[in-house]
Amino acid sequence: MENAFVIPLLMGISFVLILFFGKRIKGGQGAHLIGIPFIAVVWVLSIVVGIGWIDRVNDAEDAAEEKAELEEEHGGEEGELEEGAPVVVGGGDGSVVLTSATVSASAPVLTAEEGEEKLKVEPVVETVSWWSNGGFDFTVGTHVDGLSAILLFVVASISLLVHLFSTEYVKGDRRYTHYYAFLSLFTASMLFFVLTENIIQLIVGWELVGLCSFALIGHWWEEGKNSNAALKAFLTNRVGDIGLLVGIITLYWAVREAGENTFSIQRINELAMAGELRHFLLLVAACCLMAAVASKSGQFPLHTWLPDAMAGPTPVSALIHAATMVVAGVYMIARLYPVFFEGFSIADGGANLMAIVGIVTVLGGGLLAFVQWDIKKVLAYSTVSQLGYMVLGLGTGAWAPAIFHLFTHAFFKAGLFLGAGSVSHAAHHTFDMRKMGGLRKYMPVTFWTFILCSLALAAVPPFAGFWSKDEILLTADKSGFGVFAWLGVAGGFLTAAYMTRCVYYVFFGEYRGEGTPHESPRIMTVPLMILAFMAVVAGFVQATWSPIGTEYLIEYVEPKSAFPALVHPAFSVSKALIATAVALAAIGIAAAWYWAGIGARAKVTDNIPPLRWGKTVLEQKYYLDHLYEQGMVAGTKGPLARATYWFNQNVIDRIVDLAGISARKTGEVVYDYVDQAVIDGAVNGAGWTAEGSGEALRTVQSGKVQQYGSLLFGAAAVLAILFVILV
């Protein structure tokens, strides 16, 4: 854990090696031979970090148990340690020295809060000096705890499977080396972001992820729609980045106001939890940072770039939408959670900006998925909706459930996106569901893996999405956000219904496309099977009601240092049954609507004006693209372009023309009066003088020796007289 910096560094090295040597391997089609071994090593190291963190927490727990036993053995009547010699318990990093007054440790320590003994495990933070300015030392380093450990595993796992899947999917691509180079840099950027130790590093990682997404979304930039999608993603994220910069600056000055000068995330969280940061500044910082979250994590109303990002290769869509870019905003909230928790007063319940944005995104994204015919856009709007659940969970105090949903969502959503890529690969590279149908007969592996991942997304028990989504809604209800919890149940209904529609059009009925579809190669289906397996079992890491009874995320991932006390409700059978019944009802209604043809015969949306209008609004994506592109962009670009053109013609060009005219006039003056009259006159005068002197002296050269002698004698006499007079 102390050397975790090696993990993003390896992927950075992979990026450099692919750039220099990728095109020299297998005729430019061998870049994966560099990228895959590197990401495989990173995946192993991420597991090593996770195991190390689990051991660290276990050591602290063992030390706490030994402390309790020793207190009972050596203590007085109240079970406290007797006054006197210290007693050492635990071992290694978990060593704890106990006395009657203190409990201290090199890393894990025990503290008492509100009369209860609470386990406290400090993160592993390693820093080195970056640069100094004005006596302040800027550092760069790594911050390893349960949150960063689980994100390392998620990013490395999805990236490894995407690397493998891509060997077949983009085989023969004209920019194969470029593709794998940016996959490596993308992974390195996200790993760097996950391990960030301070808010300056956070900005660097945040922007690197955005840069790589721009390059990969626009991978096939020759087509206008692809380059436009990349620009839209880049510029939309720049809008949110203004909020990021203002929020970070505000947070820094809040820390300065508290008498400290630090960018450390751990220290900022400690100050926020200790109540030493002014609430108003925390509120301003949290609101500004939410703008960054909205752009990066596809929250309403800055979600519009995310469906268009499907223009990139499908494996890139899986990587962006499952484990990297879109969860960066969620991760930032989780990492700086005390800032948001105190700034939005989440402990008070009711409502706050984060919860409102989350639930609006859940419902808005779910409704938009219904009217899409592109399978990747259905999944894109599904991602928008599921990210809304994560933000909703964080906004209602369900920190562990939100991270749990991030974990499970990464696997089943990556499985769905790669499944869409497999379908497209078999159906002659189309994503239009109207040109599919009946593919279950031709693609059994893709079909069953897609079904399992869809059930996980629809939150049907016992699949992974059921455990994580149910826990978000249950915790929200118990934390004083009951209305949001029930609206989240409605969002679950939408999820199950639109995924049933998607499955029907892709895998059932008769094949409506061209040619004969076929199952994808094993290099593509094996990652699908792995992701489908995770969609089934990943939920059991926090399935409190399961026979295993696990609570690993609360035990190992939820921070135990500088973190608020949150509600962890017990599993509710009744609420779980309600959520399950809603999901199954949605599947049943959608199945009847499409399989039985009720929808086609009823034509409800055509015959009922309000529904027809609603469908039009959804097809136009709430007119947000019109507002942004035709309103804000065109409204700014048109007048601005005209004003710029006028300024160019009447100001800049006029200045240039005047400069040219002035230069010409100056040249004429210099030529006429300086060059011709002065310089040429001086040169001509010198010539004339030399010529006249030569003519005068020519008479002296008579050829008579006597005359030369007299001149020489006369000159010597003159010099002698001058010598006598002057010396």
Image (cartoon, rainbow, N blue to C red):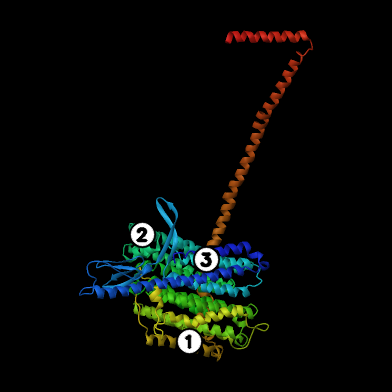
Q: Which residue is mark 2?
A: 255
Whether residue 374 is visible to the viewer of this picture, yes or no, is no
Percent coordinates x, y for residue 349 in the rendering: 34, 74
The dot on residue 485 is none
The dot on residue 188 is 3
Percent coordinates x, y for residue 132 in the rendering: 43, 52
Between 526 and 631, which is closer to the camera in this rendering?
A: 526
Mark 2 crowd level (few <14, some 14–19, many ≥20, 10 Å Cα): many
Q: Secondary structure at mark 3?
A: helix
Residue type, mark 3 in image: Ala
Q: For residue 223, what is the image quadrant? A: bottom right
Percent coordinates x, y for residue 469 in the rendering: 43, 80
Between 593 and 270, which is closer to the camera in this rendering?
A: 270
Q: Secondary structure at mark 1?
A: helix
Q: CA distance from mark 3 to mark 2?
A: 30 Å
Tell me whether circle 1 and circle 2 mark residues in contact (CB < 8 Å). Answer: no
Kindly report which numbered mark, 3 or 2, lies closer to the viewer in this rendering: 3
Q: Secondary structure at mark 2?
A: helix
Q: Which residue is mark 1?
A: 586
Quarter holding the N terminus is bottom left
Quarter holding the C terminus is top right
Percent coordinates x, y for residue 606 in the rendering: 54, 84
